[in-house]
Each structure stands twice: as structure tokens, then as C-alpha cells.
Amino acid sequence: MVEHIVLLKFSPETTIEQKQEAISRTLLLKEVIPGIMDIQQGINFSNRSKGFEIGLTVRFEDRTSLENYGPHPAHQEVFAYLQEIGVEDIIVVDFEC
């Protein structure tokens, strides 16, 4: 299995409604992208986040599933939406478990 962790930081102009929409769109990826075993995403409540506002974890069957995820059209649509609403920074960590 592969764990994919993403942290997102947004522009101050990005609304809570836009962030919630981003989460809704992301969670739907499990239904359309092969190899996703589990996907969780939510708005941060910790004061230790250094400005990162949304956390995402995706568990994949294997590295091939992760490699296919990035260029998948459904993932690209979500990424385009994130850019549209003002994502400013992203941290990604991938590891095998």
C-alpha cells in the first residue's frame, strides 16, 4: 500500500464554501479513479499548521495506482479547481506502508 498525504494553503480571499467544495470534489475521486482504497480530507483545526488549511490522505493499492492518479482527468479537474479558488502552496508526502 501507498499513503499519499497532501497539505493545502490558500489565499486569504478563498472562502470556506470554496474549501468545502474542494473537499467534496476530492472525496468523489474514490468513485472514479482505480486503485484508491481510502480517501479522507478535512479542514485543519490545529494552530500548528503553519498556515496549511486542508489535509488530505489517500491510500492506494500500490505505486502504480498512485502514478495513475496524478494525470487522471478527474484529478486534473480537482487540481484546476484548487488553482481557480486560490491555492497558494502544497506539500506532498508519499510513502509505502
Image: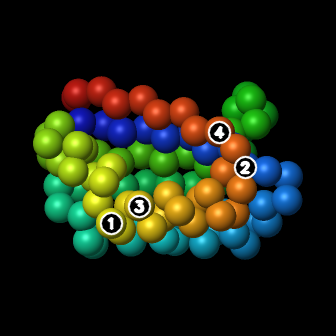
- Disc 1: CA contacts within 10 A as few (<14), some (14-19) or many (>=20): few
Name the amino acid type tagged 1: Pro
Secondary structure state at the residue bearing disc 4 = strand
Using the numbered discs, state the Cα–Cα distance from disc 3 to disc 2 in whole angstroms.
18 Å
Q: Are marks 1 and 3 in contact (CB under 8 Å)?
A: yes
Of the pair 84 and 16, the residue shown nearer to us:
84
**4 or 3: tag closer to the N-terminus:** 3
User: Can residue 44 be seen at all in this image of the molecule?
Assistant: no
Residue sitting at x 55%, y 45% = 55
State the residue position of label 1.
73
Tell whether 80 sits left or right of 67: right
Residue sitting at x 43%, y 38% = 5
**Which of label 4 and label 1 is nearer to you?**
1
Name the amino acid type tagged 4: Asp
Secondary structure state at the residue bearing disc 3 = helix
**3 or 2: tag closer to the N-terminus:** 2
State the residue position of label 4.
89
Secondary structure state at the residue bearing disc 1 = helix
Residue 37, position as x, y percentages in the image: 22, 54
Residue sitting at x 48%, y 48% = 56
Using the numbered discs, state the Cα–Cα distance from disc 4 to disc 3 in whole angstroms.
17 Å
State the residue position of label 2.
10
Residue 70, position as x, y percentages in the image: 33, 50
State the residue position of label 3.
76
**Which of label 3 and label 2 is nearer to you?**
3
